Amino acid sequence: MQVQVRDNNVDQALRVLKKRLQREGVFREMKLRKYFEKPSEERVRRKAEAIRRNRKAARKQAIREGLIAAPKRPAGSFSR
């Protein structure tokens, strides 16, 4: 993975690199590999992650279809 440093702005390049690593799941992988995980524990974890992903996708789909209301955001938070 490469990140270009523009105008000697190393801080910006580091932020971009961290964001890319986070998106790729490198930090999560490092955390999981820190200790040995039994195969049975890995199966349980992967199944729970899949259930979480499916529930999140179903919730987003229901919001898009108007079946449930979108969660309200706090008054002071504005996103880009």
Image (spheres, grey):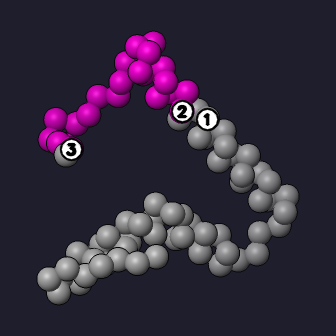
Report, in whole angstroms, how far the alpha carbon at label 2 lies from the one at label 1: 5 Å
Is residue 11 in view?
A: no
Q: Name the residue at the bottom extreme.
A: 8
Residue under numbered circle 1: 54
Is residue 67 in view?
A: yes
Magenta stretch prevailing secondary structure: loop
Q: Tell me the magenta residue range.
A: 57-79
Judged from the image, the secondary structure of the residue bearing numbered disc 1 is helix
Query: Is residue 32 found left or right of 6 in the rendered image?
Result: right
Is disc 1 surrounded by few (<14), some (14 to 19) or many (20+) residues within 10 Å?
A: few
Q: Residue at x 79, y 59 (%)?
A: 41
The image quadrant that residue 28 belongs to is bottom right
Q: Is residue 15 magenta?
A: no
Q: Decide: marks 2, 1 in contact (CB < 8 A)?
A: yes
Residue under numbered circle 2: 57
Report, in whole angstroms, how far the alpha carbon at label 1 lies from the one at label 3: 25 Å
Q: Residue at x 77, y 59 (%)?
A: 42
Residue 6 at x, y percent in the picture: 19, 80
Judged from the image, the secondary structure of the residue bearing numbered disc 2 is helix
Report, in whole angstroms, how far the alpha carbon at label 3 lies from the one at label 2: 21 Å
Q: Amino acid at mark 2?
A: Ala
Query: Is residue 33 found left or right of 27 in the rendered image?
Result: right
Q: Amino acid at mark 1?
A: Asn
Residue under numbered circle 3: 79
Residue 25 at x, y percent in the picture: 53, 64
Is disc 3 surrounded by few (<14), some (14 to 19) or many (20+) residues within 10 Å?
A: few
Q: Amino acid at mark 3?
A: Ser
Q: Is residue 60 magenta?
A: yes
Q: Earlier in the sequence, mark 3 or mark 2?
A: 2
Is disc 2 surrounded by few (<14), some (14 to 19) or many (20+) residues within 10 Å?
A: few
Judged from the image, the secondary structure of the residue bearing numbered disc 3 is loop
